[in-house]
């Protein structure tokens, strides 16, 4: 075979290989992911951050660089500005903590070729092709009611179907989808299992502790003999706990976030339990899946990747408190079952994010 023939065959082979691999990008060695927080001042936000860091630890810091940004308090404009600044700075993906009002910033981010992974709250239905990682807050609320109702049965010495009275609800951000879904889960469970009870419409319980304390103090004074008081928010729940203790009210209480005051109160029996929306696992899975897709140069999933909630009672309170003492490795171990079950799910046929925005029955 002549040199010219061998050269021709070599060129032909190269052309075939190039044709076969056209449009297939090479895997990346390292990616940068920016977690943009809605706020950073509350413990549930630190759970997101710690979960994200744990994902990087599992993947390897040589493969993933994580940047965590966000305003201290609830400020949607600052959050949006922070996200857009991260894109200009240079990042491979944005994990966006959605508290509402993020549609346009996310659209601008994706126009620049940077994918967005949504956490905390799914985007509205008009956002198509979104990838959302989060818990089912309707199921979270329902699980909370399932903790409270047996306590009421024991207190009143009768089945739930025979218990009457009022349930007082507050909500710190009226209209927020995740919070409204928690209350819907509670209310539906009470109506189903306690048909003689009256669930009052939720009032605005305010986001900050001082204001929420005043709002809840007024509500509890108005209904001192309520069956229980419920709120899907962290600071208002702390207000309820403080008022219950000061007024020596014998009513059950469930948290839906995991602040230290709640963790310790579960251990002592001061509160009935915590139904954790599992922010640590949400932060972990969002970063882990996003990083894996980027590293492999695969398209981002579309739909809702559901994260299971976690119920904390006296039975596992000690383990939970110990995990928080080392909130990185400790919580990674505590939530291992939920983490591995979620991150390894098939991602090709996820339910649409629109399902999140409808209350399940």
Image: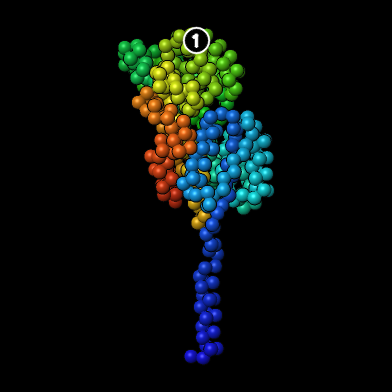
Q: Is residue 161 left or right of residue 41?
A: left
Residue drawn at (67%, 44%), measured in percent from left and top?
85
Q: On screen, 348 above or below 7? A: above
Image color mode: rainbow
Quadrant assignment for the C terminus: top left
Of 280 and 18, the residue lying toward us: 280
Location of residue 95 in the rendering, given as x and y in whole percent from the top left corner: 56, 43
Residue sitting at the far bottom: 2
**Which residue is depicted at the point 39% across and 43% down?**
341
**Residue 200 appears in view:** no
Can residue 263 be seen? yes
Instruction: Say how many tags the image has.
Output: 1
Q: Residue at x 40, y 43 (%)?
A: 340
Residue beneath the point at 52% across and 52% down: 63
Q: Residues within 10 Å of mark 1 (few under 14, many from 20)?
A: few
Image coordinates of residue 114 in percent, x first then y, are 60, 50
Residue 54, horizontal then vertical, whole percent = 49, 42
Seen from the viewer's position, the closer of residues 34 and 221 is 34
- From this view, report whether residue 26 is shown above or below residue 80: below
- Quarter of the figure with residue 69: top right
Query: What x and y, as percent, mark residue 179?
Result: 52, 28
Residue 38 vs 349, above or below: the answer is: above
Viewer-side residue, 264 vs 113:
264
Q: Which residue is mark 1?
A: 246
Q: What element does badge 1 sit on? A: helix
In the figure, is residue 315 to the left or right of 124?
left
């Amino acid at each position: 075979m002549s040199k010219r023939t061998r050269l021709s065959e070599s060129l032909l082979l190269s052309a075939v290989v190039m044709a076969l691999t056209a449009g297939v990008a090479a895997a990346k060695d390292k990616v940068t992911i920016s977690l943009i927080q809605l706020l950073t001042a509350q413990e549930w936000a630190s759970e997101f951050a710690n979960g994200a860091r744990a994902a990087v630890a599992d993947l390897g810091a040589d493969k993933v660089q994580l940047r965590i940004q966000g305003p201290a308090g609830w400020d949607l404009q600052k959050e949006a500005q922070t996200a857009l600044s991260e894109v200009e700075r240079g990042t491979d993906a944005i994990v966006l903590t959605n508290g509402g009002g993020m549609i346009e910033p996310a659209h601008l981010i994706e126009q620049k070729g940077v994918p967005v992974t949504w956490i905390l709250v799914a985007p509205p239905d008009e956002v198509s092709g979104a990838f959302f990682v989060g818990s089912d807050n309707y199921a979270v609320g329902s699980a909370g009611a399932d903790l409270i109702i047996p306590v009421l049965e024991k207190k009143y010495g009768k089945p739930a179907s025979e218990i009457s009275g009022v349930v007082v609800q507050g909500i710190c951000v009226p209209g927020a989808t995740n919070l409204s879904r928690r209350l819907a889960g509670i209310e539906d469970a009470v109506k189903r299992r306690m048909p003689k009870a009256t669930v009052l419409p939720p009032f605005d319980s305010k986001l900050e502790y001082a204001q929420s304390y005043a709002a809840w103090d007024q509500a509890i004074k108005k209904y001192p003999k309520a069956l229980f008081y419920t709120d899907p928010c962290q600071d208002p729940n702390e207000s309820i706990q403080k008022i219950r203790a000061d007024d020596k009210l014998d009513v059950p209480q469930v948290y839906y976030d995991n602040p230290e005051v709640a963790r310790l109160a579960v251990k002592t029996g001061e509160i009935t339990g915590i139904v954790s929306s599992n922010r640590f696992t949400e932060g972990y899975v969002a970063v882990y899946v996003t990083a894996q897709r980027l590293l492999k140069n695969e398209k981002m999933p579309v739909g809702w990747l559901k994260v299971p909630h976690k119920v904390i009672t006296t039975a596992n309170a000690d383990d939970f408190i110990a995990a928080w003492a080392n909130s990185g490795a400790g919580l990674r171990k505590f939530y291992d079952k939920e983490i591995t079950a979620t991150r390894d799910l098939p991602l090709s046929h996820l339910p649409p994010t629109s399902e999140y925005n409808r209350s399940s029955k």
